[in-house]
Structure formats: C-alpha cells, structure tokens
Amino acid sequence: MKNFIDTLNKAFESRIRLGIMSILMVNDQVDFTMLKELLQITDGNIASHISGLEKLGYVSVTKQFVGKKPNTSYAATIAGKEAFTKHIQALEQLIQTKK
Amino acid sequence: MSQEKEHLQAIQDIKTMMERSTKFSSISGKAGIVVGMLAVIVFAAIKWFDVTTVASLFVVMVGTLMIALSIGLYLSIAKAKKEGAAIFDTTAKRFLVQFFIPLFVGGILCLIFACQTQIGYIPAMMLIFYGFALVHASKFSLDTIKNLGYLEIVAGLFAAAFTQYGMWCWVIGFGVLHIIYGFIIYTKYEK
C-alpha cells in the first residue's frame, strides 16, 4: 500500500491544481477567463498555481494578441498529461485496495 | 478513512471539471416542450385546413423548423448566460458546430427532394437527419439527447417505409417526442 501512496504526485495535491489539470486534459487550449469561470477563484490564485505547474513542465503558456487584447492560453504538455494520468491511476488504486 | 474519502473526492472533482469544461449543459427542457407543442399545432392546422399542395406543405414545414430552432436557441442561450459567458462560448460553439453539420446536409437533401417533387420522403429525411444531429452532438452536451436522437431516427425510418403516414411520424417525432424529452430534461436538470 505504501507504494501507491508514493506514486501520488505532490504537484497535484491542491484542489485547484487538480482542477486546472483536469480541464487541460480534455481541452487543447484554454484561456485565462475560462479557467477562472470554471474554477471560480481569483486571478492571483490561478496565476500562482499555473506558474507552479509551468515550472514543473506540466503546463505550457502561450501569450498572444487577439485584436488589441492580450490573451493568455494554457495547454497541458505531454509530460503533464503523463504525470496526471499516473496520478489518477494511483488515486484509483488507493481507493480500490482499501475497499 | 478520511484519506480514502479525500481520494474519492479528488476523483469526483476531476470528473466534474472534465465534464463541465467540455459539455454544453444549457439545453433548455422548456424549449423542448414549447417546440413540441408548436409541431402539434402546425400538424393540426395542416389537417384542419386540409393543406395538400407540395409547395405549401414545404413552406409550412420549413417555417416551423425555423421558428422551432429559434425558440430552442433563444431559451438555451438565456439559460446559459446565467452559468457564465466564457464557459458558454466555448462549449456552445463546439456543440452548435457538431449539431448543425448533419442538420445542414439534411436540409440540403430535403431541398433537393422538394425540387424533384419527392415530397413524400421529406418528413423522413427531416427526422433522420435531425436524429443524427442530436446523436452526434450529444457527445458535447447532455447524454439524454442521444436517446431522443435514436428515437427520431426510428420515427424517420418508419416515415420512409410508410410514406402515406409520413406526416403522422413527423408529428410524433417533432411533437410528442419533444414534449416528452423536454419534460425529462426539465425535471432532471432544471428542478
């Protein structure tokens, strides 16, 4: 059982990060406003969690201009997707073995 | 024990976030009921005034479809605006594109049939392509509309097999089924 707990990824412990990664797993590109409305948290909060995930190489950030407005969009990297899949598998195994 | 609950909660959170960010959940049940009643009224009017000419039947059917789509869109958009604009934009766009591709093809096919005065097959074509549109777009919306889609296709096949009862299938498909499913969606998601 200890092995399973070790496979849980510390990077996804917070609920916000879990939420961000879930959204990015099923959407190719997601912009800041959509993340904010889905997660219903403050700008600063999202930004800090995103930059945490970015530093780990799990999320890539694209900044561009849509017309005259700056638009930041996020995507999960391949490494991010792999790590998150492993995290979900570990969670499922933990629940199953305890039953 | 509490840790186990935490893990379970995490899994559930992941599932809801994935669904909420991809599915357009603002289909309005009320719109389904209104549209269904409209179809029944139009059908009754056709029978009452004994409309039989090809051109006038076609105009009435296309007109009904346009009004029905407008009601559906209007009520769904109204429902969606309450849920937040950015989620609505992305998920609705995806849903609408998937929904209108089969519907557009079906519409053109109906037009071709009408030009060749094969009016008998038009109710069948309308039902079948509308059904396909629902099944196809259900991936990006409520699962319930997939079942409605299957039933519309079945109604359409009956309409094609027994063209003399085409209009009856049409009123069952667009009228009765919409009222039933509108009610199901309303009680399941809006109460």
Image (cartoon, rainbow, N blue to C red):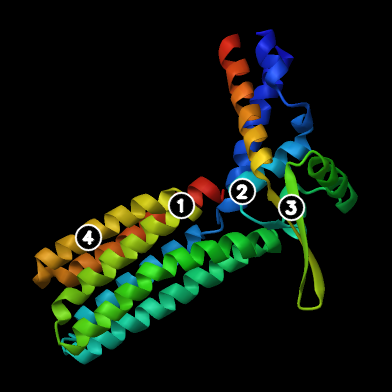
Measure how far apart labels 3 and 2 are at the Cα level.
Answer: 11 Å
Q: Mark 1 — residue? A: B139
User: How crowded is the residue under tag 2: few (<14 C-alpha within 10 Å), some, or many (20+)?
Assistant: some
Q: Position of residue B129 (x, y in %)?
A: 30, 67
The three-letter amino acid code for the residue at tag 2 is Arg
User: How crowded is the residue under tag 1: few (<14 C-alpha within 10 Å), some, or many (20+)?
Assistant: some
Q: Mark 2 — residue? A: B20
Tally of numbered discs? 4
Q: Considering the image in quadrants, where does the N terminus of chain A appear?
A: top right
Q: Left or right? Give the position of A90 relative to A43.
A: left
Q: Mark 3 — residue? A: A35
Residue at x-position 43% and y-position 58% = B137
Q: Left or right? Give the position of A44 relative to B112.
A: right
Identify which residue, B71 or B144, lies in the foreground.
Answer: B144
Measure how far apart labels 1 and 4 are at the Cα level.
Answer: 22 Å
Q: Mark 3 lies on which chain?
A: A
A85 up-or-down from B135: above or below: above
The three-letter amino acid code for the residue at tag 4 is Ala
Q: What element carries label 1?
A: helix
Q: Left or right? Give the position of B36 relative to A2.
A: left
